[in-house]
Amino acid sequence: MSSLTPSFQWLDTPDALDAACEQVADASVIALDTEFFRENTFFPVPALIQFTAGEEAYLIDPVAISCTNKFRSLLQNSAIKLLHACSEDLEVFQHWAGVLPTPLMDTQVVQGFLGDNPGMGYQKLVEFWVGETLPKEETRSNWLVRPLTSAQCHYAALDVIYLLKVWTLQEEKLAILGRREWVDAECASLIEQAGRSVDNDQQWYTRQRQLWRLTPRQMEAYRLMTTWREGETRRRDLPRNWLVSDKLLFAIAEKMPSNRFELAEVDGVKPMLIKKEGDSLLAMVKQAQHCDEVKLPTRWPDPMHPAFKSRFKAIKKVITAKASDLGVAPEMLMRRRDIETLVMQDLAGEPLALPSGWRGDFLNAALSEALMERMS
């Protein structure tokens, strides 16, 4: 168990929050964390927001108060904002504060560049670096109930206090390995991606692992429907599957129904969906049916086809070897989806979207050579 009994302040008035912001205004690093609820909404419902710049943690009650301008400014001042596995936390800050914490440093990303386990959870990370075991009992507790228990407050405070301790040690090793610039670039890209959520709606369809089964026209229908679904769930603040799931949209795209009777025959489509959203879904299928052929998406290749498999294997071999040389996990160099994109571009004879920056320096010559060998 942790040997530390944390000191913390509970902040449930704007004045208390602003006073706490002044206490850490000159800090060079501010550790942040959030607790939230997300079962019946699209956006996370913030239940607690924690921050610290040292041994005292501040616990903001977002149920009681709105974000203040001083905290908003704190999130965007020059201090490093330290988080762990930040993607959902960023959504909380974007939704509650209206801004993203920058400049960002994510300790999970850092760990990915320091070893071969880029998905290390926070408790294991603390154990690895500090040798302390954090309590786990409160991980799944109800953070929206008031008042919070002392165990919940201690858990929440320890989360940010130990984050600073982990980062101090990680930072030393990063400097020894000369990889700080890599991490800075990676964390900056996380902020950039988080700030483009509406743009990302247009690309949601590419997450579908079975996309190769669709014709370009079916793909366009699926793209239109997923883009619409993302916008609607955000507008209505509903979980995606409460409106319509990816699986169901994919099935509709496969069948390309032209009327409500054909839509009703798609496996999984219920009368209530037809009643509420049928006209919208059919309009998008019709739009795809009449789309100019040159504007349709490029057909995705079958991942089981020998030409695809051989190229994928060649690239994967390069990535694995380079990752081994660096002592990092292969996915820190190139994710599966990026490998697949390269293979598709190569098969289509398109210019290759090779990695840029330090990744390009390490990989591009070997990647180009590997793909050239596939062609010869």
Image (spheres, rainbow, N blue to C red):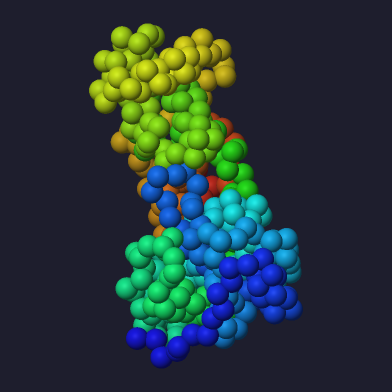
**Can you say whether 25 is above or below 216 in the image?**
below
Q: Quadrant of residue 149?
A: bottom left
Residue lying at 42% horizontally and 41% vertically, measured from the top left: 239
Considering the image in quadrants, where does the N terminus appear? bottom left
Of the pair 255 and 22, the residue shown nearer to us: 22
Of the pair 19 and 268, the residue shown nearer to us: 19
**Can you say whether 310 is above or below 32 in the image?**
above
Residue lying at 32% horizontally and 73% vertically, measured from the top left: 137
- Residue 246 appearing in the image: no
Residue lying at 33% horizontally and 32% vertically, measured from the top left: 247
Considering the image in quadrants, where does the C terminus appear? top left
Q: Quadrant of residue 78?
A: bottom right
Residue 113 placed where, x, y %? 51, 69
**Can you say whether 207 is above or below 363 in the image?**
above
Q: Quadrant of residue 67?
A: bottom right
Residue 207 placed where, x, y %? 43, 39
Figure label count: 0
Residue 250 placed where, x, y %? 36, 27
**Can you say whether 304 is above or below 274 in the image?**
below
Residue 81 placed where, x, y %? 63, 69
Residue lying at 33% horizontally and 15% vertically, measured from the top left: 263
- Residue 268 appearing in the image: yes
Of the pair 14 and 239, the residue shown nearer to us: 14
